[in-house]
Image (tube, grey):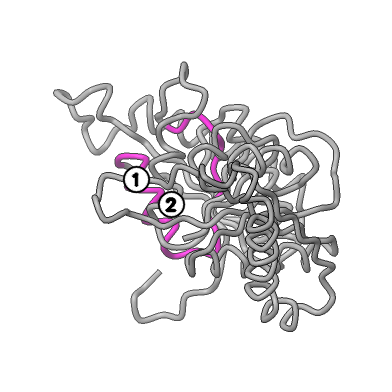
Amino acid sequence: MGSGGVMTESIAVGTDGSAAATAALVWAVDDAIRRGLPLRIVHVVDRWPYDVAELPAPDRPDHLSRRGEQVLAEAVAASAERGPGVCVTAELIEGAPVKVLGEQAGSVVELVIGNRGLGGFAGSPLGSVPIRVAGHVPGAVVVVRPGAGQTHGEVVVGIDGSAECQPALSFAFEQAVLRGCPLRAVYGWQAPVHAFTPEAGRDMDEVRQEQRRMVADRLTGWKEEFPTVKVVQDVTCAHPVPTLVAASARADLLVVGSRGLGAVGSVLLGSVSRGVLHHAHCPVAVVR
């Protein structure tokens, strides 16, 4: 893409040939069909763990590149079969997966990746790459796990009291429109400890109403912008992570916002988005 040219919107998907990457590819192709957008399939060749000392001669492709080309060819064939009308390009890029994928995410509508693999440690329940990409890069990162079963016909979006959830709401409403399904807006809030004294009961009802009002206010503008979307409000006094995870069991997509880098700089991903990525039953979009 020349810096002078106009950049067309597209979807990027990272693949390493794993089961999770295959699930991510399926999700990305389906969304490209829904959105009518081209798809860019990316494979990252990460030499660092292997041959630091002996870099391959430029004239002979080494085994990592050969394997990468094969993974890409298989992914292109699979996407052509699933979405024959989708315009697909494939790219082999050398570098650290987190950095390469982060750069990709900045220039596309969404980056789709599997929930493990791509340089993550096979033993961890969630590879290090998705955790380090989701929430750090501008835009939306969709993390897909293999074995997503039947369609439920619902998109869930997590809401909190901050302005950071606006991009997540935008993404979620768009997905609900594309799929023609309802959107469940979930807000889990935790009661202060003193709330459990007998005289606090009355105040708690007020707090509950206040929280419901806050969620309703947050949704008003979006409902006007997307009048066809049926919105279900789900406001509970409970920790957001288990609340969202429970809702994800009946959802086709769970959308959460991310605060990006916290004030400390080391807070890589909000505890809610991280908890949700680990435990959700459906694909998760982290939108920054």
SS state under label 1:
loop
* Alpha carbon distance from label 2 to label 1: 8 Å
Q: Which residue is mark 2?
A: 135
Q: Check residue 23 for magenta coloring.
A: no
The image quarter containing residue 277 is top right
Q: In the picture, residue 211 is in which quadrant?
A: bottom right
> Which residues lie in the magenta part?
95-118
- Location of residue 77 (image quadrant): top right
Tell which circle, 2 or 1, labels the residue nearer the N-terminal end: 2
Circle number at residue 229: none
Q: Are marks 2 and 1 in contact (CB under 8 Å)?
A: yes
Give the labeled residue for mark 1: 268
* Residue 90 horizontal/vertical position (percent): 52, 50
Say what amino acid the circle numbered 2 marks. Answer: Gly
Residue 9 place in picture, x, y as percent:
55, 71
Q: Image point 63% across, 34% down: which residue?
A: 145
**Which quarter of the rendering shows the N terminus?**
bottom left
Q: Residue furthest left?
A: 53
